[in-house]
Amino acid sequence: MNIVTTFKEKRREKQLKYERKMLREISLEILRTKVKDFFTPYLKNKRQHTSAIEEGCLDIAIESYLLGASYSRFGYFGEGVEKVKTRCLIEEKYLNDTLYDYFLYWGIQPENDLANESFYRTCEAFVDYWWREGFHKGEKRYRMRLH
């Protein structure tokens, strides 16, 4: 007797395999360095919570990286980066909002509206940076036929 598998299960297995391959391309040290580069000015007064905040940022960075990698297929077939980014606006906005809300949860709240918007833009830049990294690395894997 054969085991019946569904198309969804097969697709999920393939997606997990691809994500594992993509995660081999980045290191934890690079992720932590970028978290410090982007968010050091905001973490000056929160030394006691830095490791917990850093862990949340790492999670968002990895999710953003994998999101970019999953959309890199469209770049391989000739679409530009900005056009591909429009395909995942909802997912990217969700990651931006999640990161911003995570910081607010840990008590990092800018003093005025201008600083608040600047902080949100920093969160957007962080997510965008990792999305582009994943996109370019994934596109490279497609070109090398390693997908």
Image (spheres, grey):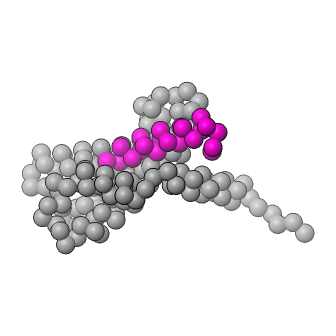
Relative to 92, is 112 on the left or the right?
A: left
Magenta stretch bounds:
126-147
Query: For residue 71: magenta?
Result: no
Residue at 87% from the left image edge and 66% from the top image edge: 2
Name of the residue lying farthest toward the bottom: 48
> In the picture, which quadrant includes the N terminus?
bottom right
Image position of 10 with respect to 75: above or below:
below
Query: For residue 139: magenta?
Result: yes
Relative to 42, is 130 on the left or the right?
A: right
Residue 97 vs residue 61, the one in the foreground: 61
> In the picture, which quadrant includes the C terminus?
top right
Image position of 105 with respect to 93: above or below:
below
**Position in image of residue 21 (x %, y %):** 57, 53
**Position in image of residue 28 (x %, y %):** 40, 59
Residue at 45% from the left image edge and 52% from the top image edge: 26
Can the viewer see residue 68 in this picture?
A: no
**Position in image of residue 104 (x %, y %):** 22, 61
**Position in image of residue 120 (x %, y %):** 24, 48
Relative to 51, is 72 on the left or the right?
A: right
Residue at 42% from the left image edge and 43% from the top image edge: 133
Relative to 101, is 70 on the left or the right?
A: right
* Occupied quadrant, residue 8: bottom right
Magenta-colored segment: predominant secondary structure: helix
